[in-house]
Amino acid sequence: MNTGPRADAWLRPYVLGLVGLDLAGALTATLAGTAVRFHGSLAAATTVPYLVISLLLPLVWVLFVCLGGGYERRFLGVGTEEYRRVAVAGAVLAATVAVGAYAVKFDLARGYVLVALPLIVLLSLGLRYARRKALHRRRRSGACMSGVVVVGYGVAASDLIRRFRDEIYHGMRVVGVCLPEHEAHTAAIEGVPVLGSFADAADAAALVGADTVAVLACPEMDGVELRRLAWQLEKTGTDLTVASALMEVAGPRTTIRPVAGLPLLHVEHPELVGARRLVKGAFDRCAAALALVLLSPLFLVLCLLIRSEGGGPAFFRQTRVGRGGAEFTVYKFRTMVVGAEALKSLLQPRNEHDGVLFKMRRDPRVTPTGAWLRRYSLDELPQLINVVRGEMSLVGPRPPLPEEVAQYGHDVRRRLVVKPGLTGLWQVSGRSDLSWEESVRLDLRYVENWSLTLDIQILWKTWSAVIRGAGAY
């Protein structure tokens, strides 16, 4: 049995690095606060009270972040929970400083407080973000991964393996699979070895040095079996995770509600209407209007470039389907020759995309200027007009054509319950390189888990995706 180093050996140095960054950021913030308080005077700044505070605050800060779960493995590397916990720790620190100063009757200068405390939080968040990006780069090269043994049926295990490979930044690598008795004769799934049946899960995890056993939804692994497995894994310190049968529902919509010793998973309905939707709509329109004003010189230059290439209109208008199935006219910079739509039927046999979409890497209808516009998604900018008009959102599913919608199945029509977006998960996850199935999955994930925070994340990631030009054609 393999008792060598576990795959999560990267975790300890990563956490120690975070502690060091939090200390360094907090010390920098307190020094900045001291400089503001004493106007850069070194002699005044080294007075005993402020010197003690400046040295003590970084230690207290790390303690509060630790108590708030800011160093817990399950929150590190992905998602926003790590950042949320750091922000909460910052609020607790501010309250503690205020109460402590009042209790000891120390008149702490407002300039020091207003600079040091917010800067502590901002620097910690910024440094953690930079360290996370470095972690993601290492994971893309196969380092800093956690080993997972998957327990479940072959089809579900295969799907999970593919997802972990596609979203490698999660840091989960499936190192073994345990199948039900009637499937256990299979040698491998998606190139991952089958290590035995459900009963062998704990031994299999120890054999390959896995950090986690992930149990997928299956009737054989009921409450009694899961409890027994947990007892076995407890001996080796291996984590146990249990996947629900829910598809594409993120953490913020789910909570565990223990009832009579039974952990019930409560699922909130997605927020498709309400106050936050009104805030999103207002933000979309204001941001789009401002962008149109700021980008108007660029619009003029692009219009001249397009018209100089064989004449024809600078803008392309096309009917798309929006929220609730309502049709509207979408605006784009023209990237194809005039009359390109009439040539589409002739090129249909050369379609390189599955599903209902039509995509070609070297579409002969695309002009040289159009290819450049598409590479950097500049052709999409006129859709800001649609956002201002309330027909689209800055972030949402891809706006489909009527003929595409006509081929939608019942589940796919779920995309139409929200406004289509100028960008979305499809834009930051591969663009045209995505399969039809993957595009639908990402759009449905967005619909089910929409939040203002997710919108901001997608807008931020869009810049990187556009600059790289990956998956655009």
Image (cartoon, rainbow, N blue to C red):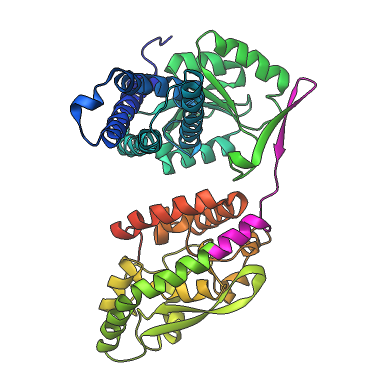
Quadrant location, the N terminus: top left
Q: Is residue 143 magenta?
A: no
For the point 50% across and 20% down, the residue is: 67
Residue at image point 62% right, 59% down: 277
Picture quadrant of residue 471: bottom left
Horizontal side of residue 310 vs 228, given as left or right? left
> On the rendered structure, is 315 left or right of 258?
left
Residue stretch in magenta: 258-282
Q: Residue 50 occupies which quadrant of the picture?
A: top left
Q: Which x, y percent locates residue 423?
A: 46, 62
Q: Which residue of the protein is positioned furthest toward the right in this rendering? A: 260
Seen at 27% across and 80% down, the residue is 301
Can residue 365 be seen in this snapshot? Answer: yes
Whether residue 176 is visible, yes or no, is no
Pick the front one: 118 or 419: 118
The stretch drawn in magenta includes residue 262: yes
Does 141 sit left or right of 162 as displayed? left
Check the image and report above or below for 237 versus 111: above
37 to 49, vertically: above or below = below
**Residue 222 position within the rendered picture, expressed as x and y whole percent measured from the top left:** 71, 24
| Residue 161 in the image: above or below residue 12 | below
Picture quarter with the C terminus: bottom left
Which one is nearer the viewer's eye here, 453 or 407?
A: 453
